[in-house]
Image (spheres, grey):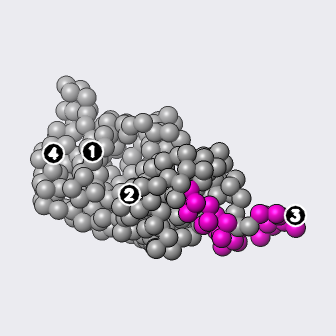
Amino acid sequence: MSLSELGAAVRWLREHTEPAGAGLPAGVRGTGRRVRGLRREELAELAGVSADYIRRLEQGRRHPSAGVVSAIARAVRAGRADYERLCALAGYAAVDGQVPREAGAASLRLLERFAGTPAFLTDAAWNVIAVNGAWRALGGGTPAGTARDWNVAWRTFCDAREEIGRSEEHQAGFRAALAARLRDTHLRYPADASLAGLVDELRSASRRFDTLWRTPETVSAYENRAVFRHPDGGGIALDGALLEVPGDGLMAVVLTAAPGSADAARLGEVVRASGGPAVVKVGQAGPG
């Protein structure tokens, strides 16, 4: 790995990227522009870092993360060869550009183990892959017949379900966590067309999402509380936790009630009264 070579490569790409080609408005160029390609400030804004970071990187004084390398490559609309070269100079392997979307046998067995606990699997773009019987018993994730039915981010920002309620504080935290995770996924998989399409649709349809996308909040952990309104009446307050499933590149969302609480008793009643298979694979196109 050579940081000086990496810096030179970033500078070359910046200087050979036309602002219009990077998606900047035509008026940004201006008649008094004296630099070739993008300014450091422009690349920094597009990549989500500071102008000083870009300056130090080009001087060979910063070692970027894999996510920053992907962000810079995407900002300058780098081709596959240039992207792979940046990754190699930074000491990373280039990702293949596609979000893993298949659940292996071990991942599905994980859902089975949570027999009395609502849980579901999603890919890194928040597309739900599979749900367990306890989740289905809650009745909060029934598809509504839209193209994004099984995407958690879409259902949260654009098509919220009345059966699932959160306090204002918990809703804000949940949205921030969804947007932060999705932004990180977008950096890791810059060539995934379906992911890019999802992000574009979310930014167009939801002002809240667009704001979080442009000015992301720091999210240290995924923890959230929601009240599920069961069709039989009454609400069940559950705490959500996120588990990584590294083998398949998936995430498992697990919902639990406080031990010994009325919510735990009510959840047990609802799950015991339900029937059907332990695990159900669902369409890619989530519960929120």
The one nearer the camera, 26 or 156, is 26
Q: Can residue 126 be seen in this view?
A: no
SS class of the residue under badge 4?
loop
The one nearer the camera, 268 or 116, is 116
Residue annotated with mark 4: 114
Amino acid at circle 1: Leu
Number of marks: 4
Question: Which comes sooner in the sequence, label 4 or label 2?
Answer: 2
Q: In this rendering, which labeled residue sits more in front, label 4 or label 1?
A: 1
Amino acid at circle 4: Phe
Image coordinates of residue 134 in percent, x first then y, are 19, 48
Question: Do residues under tags 3 and 2 come within 8 Å of each other at their CB atoms?
Answer: no
Question: Do residues under tags 4 and 2 come within 8 Å of each other at their CB atoms?
Answer: no
Residue annotated with mark 3: 32
The one nearer the camera, 156 or 270, is 156
Question: Do residues under tags 3 and 1 come within 8 Å of each other at their CB atoms?
Answer: no
Residue annotated with mark 1: 243
Q: Which quadrant is home to the N terminus?
A: bottom left
Question: Which comes sooner in the sequence, label 3 or label 1?
Answer: 3
Residue at 48% in and 63% down? 86
SS class of the residue under badge 1?
strand
Q: In this view, does 269 lie to the left or right of 6?
A: left
User: What's the magenta region?
Assistant: 7-35
Image coordinates of residue 81 in percent, x first then y, are 46, 74
Residue at 50% in and 39% down? 218
Residue at 15% in and 45% down? 114
Residue annotated with mark 2: 92
Neighbour tally class for label 1: few under 14, some 14-19, many 20 plus, Cα within 10 Å: few
Q: Can residue 12 be seen in this view?
A: yes
Question: Which comes sooner in the sequence, label 4 or label 1?
Answer: 4
In the image, residue 100 sits, relative to residue 107, either above or below, namely below
Residue 83 sits inside the magenta stretch: no
